[in-house]
Image: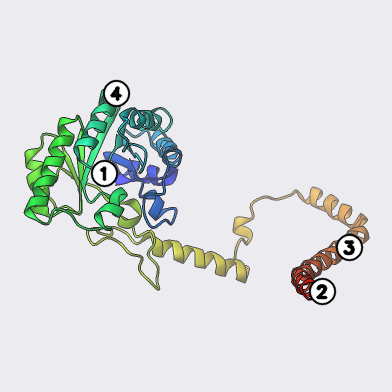
Amino acid sequence: MVTAYDYPSAVHVARAGIDLILVGDSVAMVELGHETTQEMETDDMVHHCKAVKLGLEFVKSGSMLVGDMPFGTYEYEDTDIALRNAYRFVKEGGCDAVKLEGGSVARAKTARRIVDGGVAVMGHVGLTPQAISVIGGFRAQGRTAVRARELLDDALRLQDAGCFAVVLECIPANVAAAITETLEIPTIGIGAGGGTSGQVLVFHDMLGMLSHPQHDQFVPKFCKKYAQVGLAIQGGLKEFKDDVESGVFPGEDYSPYKMTEEEQAIFERLLQKDAEHRRRQHEIAAKKLSQADEYETLKLYGDNNSNNNNKGK
């Protein structure tokens, strides 16, 4: 499983033959610049799911599309709220399933309500990013025997609730392997060792989207970089800037649209007819812009001076 958040990333992931595509709420961090995933709303997630769905349709992909239900959309005691939001992911976003974080009794009850309502659910235990306020940040989980056993119970609870798979995030490999061996449904690991049924990584992290020649963007310790796409992007943008400034681009090779010689001659005669008028109009426009710029500058400082003068009166 790999994340995708828009049409281009969906096309790339689908063409690679990835079985599961997750529209993760991690979009908040890797695409929108937030520090956590908690800022996302259902409208935001549905928007991204629609774009990813179009990418899958373009490739004619059979990949399963899973949408992350964001923080604050499924935690209520009234599980019908979660079901209504899950329906939006399917009906509007085009998702095949939704993903929930946590494995408590209450969360399992919510998962069961959504499954009974006809929507497939993927569970998620271990590090649950939406709950960082409670767990104290992005920290590994299940490193004590008691907590590891609780994670196994969480996963079993989600399985019993009807989840078709469970994500295991940032837990010791032996714990993930034990959970995988115990469950009848697949597990998908992220920072959980190689004993899970499958693996998931974030698109931007695994491809080095934010790599830069002068610095390296933070990437989780468990993430292997399979490419350094950010370096290629920086190189391409710099080359474009240099080509434009030097006049190399576009040049003849990238100026494909031509007039016939006859039409060009007519066009030049038309320009000559009103050349003087256009010159005068150019001078008038330049003068207006210059005056407007000066006016704005004077207005900026004038207001301040005016306020100061009024204070003294």
Tell me where residue 53 appears, x and y as whole percent: 40, 35
Which residue was labeled with disc 3? 284
Disc 4 + disc 2, Cβ < 8 Å:
no
**Mark earlier in primary sequence (4, 2):** 4
* Circles 3 and 1: CB atoms closer than 8 Å: no
Q: Which of marks 4 and 1 is in front?
A: 4
Q: Looking at the picture, does residue 119 appear above or below residue 153?
A: above
Counting from the top left corner in percent of width and height, residue 26 is at 35, 50
Secondary structure beneath dot 2 equals loop
Q: How far apart are marks 4 and 2 (CA)?
A: 73 Å
The amino acid type, in three-letter code, at marker 1 is: Met
Residue drawn at x 16%, y 38% is 186
Amino acid identity at mark 4: Gly
In three-dimensional space, the C-alpha distance between marks 3 and 4, rounded to whole angstroms, equals 68 Å
Separation of disc 1 and disc 2 at Cα?
71 Å
Q: The residue tagged with tag 3: helix, strand or loop?
A: helix
